[in-house]
Amino acid sequence: MLHALCEMAEQMFPSFQEKDEDKKKAMREELAKITIPHYAACIEARLEKMHKLPTFQSDVVYVHEIALFTWMKAFKEGFMDHIPTTILDGYKFHNITFDKVAANQKVKEWYSLPHGPPTKLKLTYFPVAGRAEPIRLAFFIGGIDFEDVRLSFDEYEKVKSELPFNQLPVLEVDGEPVSQSLAILRYAGSLTGLYPTDLLAASHVDEIFVLIDEMFNNPEWRATVRERSPDKQQMMRKNLSNDLIPKTLDFLEKRVDAFKGQYATGSALTVADLALYALILLLKAGKPGIPTNISDPYKNLLRVFDQVKKHPKVIEWNATHA
């Protein structure tokens, strides 16, 4: 049964690759007239025999029944143009099987849950790169549409009390707010394939952006953000440039070097690379008290920065968000 369904799928696949609409239509019509009825007849005969066996007369759902159900559901929903949605309506045991699977409580539960990407993403931050830039880039590189809201500091003060933890960035996923930049970055990476599914690889990514987060959350760094006196702020940043920043960069440099990969944690681009890129971008921004060349001694970090900067989607993003 499974082999027959796979074989039928192989016969259908070329029609998905065909770019010429007239040729594709002819291929689909042939599938509807010859190929699908041929396999449906074979499967129907097999289902009829299996239906007589006690094993298959219970409510237990078997894997071949699930496979057939998904195919029938796709046909009924019209996922292939030029293939009638009613093409399998005349096959009695096909439809008995379909109804059996559709009535299964777990199947009902599955289809009651949201699947796939959210319908609406809204990322809110300040009109700077900052903590939100890796998130923005992850969505953009991954081709995920999102609303990029940038609040002035006056606008932020008006909505601050309504925000989780009174902080930005905040991501709204179909209206549900998610706070904390690392949580949002993991979500964005998971949604776009830029956060590893392998647990060890994911932990390496976490090492990178958690260390960066620790620097940003250090009391000395946070004090410079709150300071309103330009002279005091510059002096505080000089202190950061002599201790906290190079200490963090040194740790990151050694860790990236230890991973021995093309990117920050290995052979693939991840949100760790985007987090490093945003960090170096910030340090190169020319903030009074932080030398623009402070990251120059860290060759591995600069290599990652340059790779991200040269990424076609990052170039495209920067061209429209300068």
Image (spheres, grey):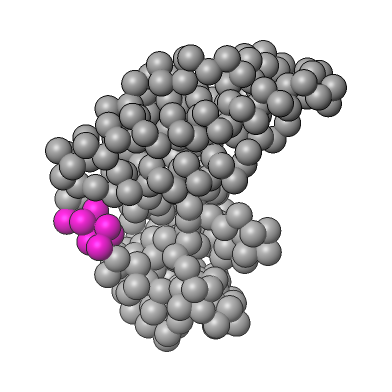
Q: Is residue 30 above or below residue 91?
A: below
Nearest the eye: 159 or 176: 176
Is 230 positioned to the left or the right of 256 in the image? left
Residue at image position (48%, 52%) is 193
The percent position of residue 101, horizontal first and vertical second, equals 66, 20
Q: Is residue 95 above or below residue 126?
A: above
Is 87 positioned to the left or the right of 320 in the image? right
Q: Quadrant of residue 205?
A: bottom right
Residue 307 visible to the viewer: yes
Give the prevailing secondary structure in the magenta stretch.
helix
Residue at image position (47%, 41%) is 8
The percent position of residue 231, horizontal first and vertical second, equals 35, 60
Q: Quadrant of residue 58?
A: top right
Q: Quadrant of the N terminus?
A: top right
Q: Quadrant of residue 207?
A: bottom right
Is 241 positioned to the left or the right of 146 in the image? right
User: In the image, is residue 275 part of the stretch drawn in magenta?
Assistant: no
Q: Is residue 203 above or below residue 291?
A: above
Which segment did they paint magenta? 312-319
Residue at image position (17%, 56%) is 319
Nearest the eye: 282 or 146: 146
Question: How many numbered callouts?
Answer: 0
User: In the image, is residue 314 part of the stretch drawn in magenta?
Assistant: yes
Q: Quadrant of the C terminus?
A: bottom left
Residue 249 visible to the viewer: no
The percent position of residue 224, horizontal first and vertical second, equals 45, 55
The percent position of residue 304, horizontal first and vertical second, equals 41, 74
Residue at image position (77%, 21%) is 52
